[in-house]
Image (cartoon, rainbow, N blue to C red):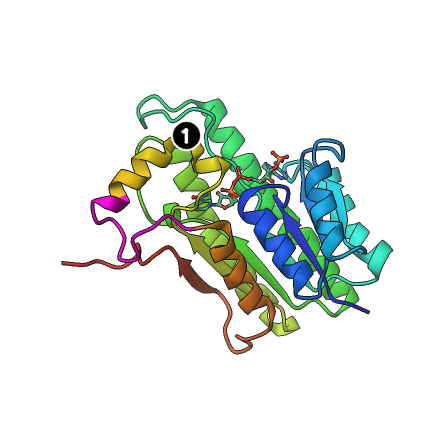
Amino acid sequence: MKKTAIVTGASRGIGRAISLRLASDGFTVLAAARADEVKAADYIKELKAISPASVYIPTDISVRADRERLVDAAYERFGRLDILVNNAGVAPTERRDLLEMTEESMDRLLDINLKGTFFLTQYASSAMVRNGGGEMIINVTSMSAYTASINRGEYCISKAGLAMVTELFAARLAEYGINVYEIRPGIIRTDMTATVTKKYEDLIAGGLLPISRMGQPEDIAKAVSAIASGAFPYSTGEVFNIDGGFHFRTL
Ligand code: NAP
């Protein structure tokens, strides 16, 4: 029986690359995003071409019933859940200065990025512990976990919170042999960054990054693939910066 991996936010961008890569690596993927099957048809076709057994399950991670259905599907359909990749996330619909950020925007970001991911992880890891066999959890956070951007503070706060979620579950699940990792992407070319591509390209041309290019979703997928291969058994709570070298100071 093949190993299974849940990947949230799988229909586009980074999650799409991660899910297709894990499918190529031999995992049966339970791919999740909010879009229905009709809207996600092209993606589902791509996934099934690589791994016919993999499934797409429309899921809003901020909705409890959806989270539970997704995890339950792993056990009902395949009898196991080996890896959870928490990738789904949103940016603010409008970038607003910190002094004008709305409570509604804060609620939306925290509900999806932080609370949704936390409770999906709680439900999935409880099921892994109950059923045995769970192997690891990988959280896709962001350089925004430690970089203050004053025009999307709610996003930064959600990702900083997720960094602690990684450490909390790493501490709690180690005794069950379930390792928890965090990947911090830098600036990656996806729908999320489409409206600010020019700004980022100019910053990169001006020397922002040691590796002088925007990242591609596949850069993150390669890291997930390496971690999912089990290459880091004596490591948990670890952060992988996949960011072109953004995270260290230079002079
Ligand atoms: P994206 O292109 O906007 O894709 C986001 C994916 O998440 C889509 O599949 C979307 O599908 C899904 N999604 C959104 N809300 C969801 C929800 N409530 N429940 C389930 N699925 C949901 O974004 P991306 O750039 O690939 O980002 C993926 C992750 O990487 C995010 O957590 C993001 O914060 C993080 N990240 C991105 C960058 C970057 O530069 N792009 C940098 C650092 C970190 P639906 O809309 O159909 O739900």
Judge whether residue 210 is colored magenta: yes
On screen, residue 206 versus residue 144, left or right, reads left
Q: Which percent across, then down, holds residue 3?
A: 74, 66
The answer, for residue 149, to whether it is visible in the render is no
In this orientation, which residue lies closer to the viewer: 170 or 228?
228
Q: Position of residue 115 (x, y in %)?
A: 57, 41
Q: Is residue 46 left or right of residue 102?
A: right
Q: Quadrant of residue 97?
A: top left
Amino acid identity at mark 1: Thr
User: What residue is shown at x 50% (from left), y 73% (from top)?
Assistant: 235
Residue 211 in magenta?
Answer: yes
Q: Mark 1: which secondary structure?
A: helix
Q: Is residue 76 left or right of residue 208?
A: right
**Residue at the image point whose x is 56% and y is 77% from the top:** 233
Image quarter (top left, top right, bottom left or bottom right) of the C terminus: bottom left
Question: Badge 1 is on which residue?
Answer: 195
Residue 155 appears in view:
yes
* Placement of the N terminus among the 4 image quadrants: bottom right
Query: Is the CB–ligand 1 distance for label 1 below 8 Å?
Result: no
Indicate the quadrant where residue 84 lies.
Answer: bottom right
The stretch of residues the image draws in magenta is 204-215
Q: Residue 219, relative to residue 237: is it above or below?
A: above
Which residue is at the front of the view, 49 or 7?
49
Q: In the image as oriented, which residue stretches furthest toward the right?
A: 76
Residue 161 picture location, percent across and down:
46, 47
Which residue is at the front of the view, 164 or 151? 151
Residue beneath the point at 41% across and 30% down: 195
Magenta stretch secondary structure, dominant: loop
Q: Residue at x 59, y 54 (%)?
A: 18
Relative to 45, residue 103 above or below: above
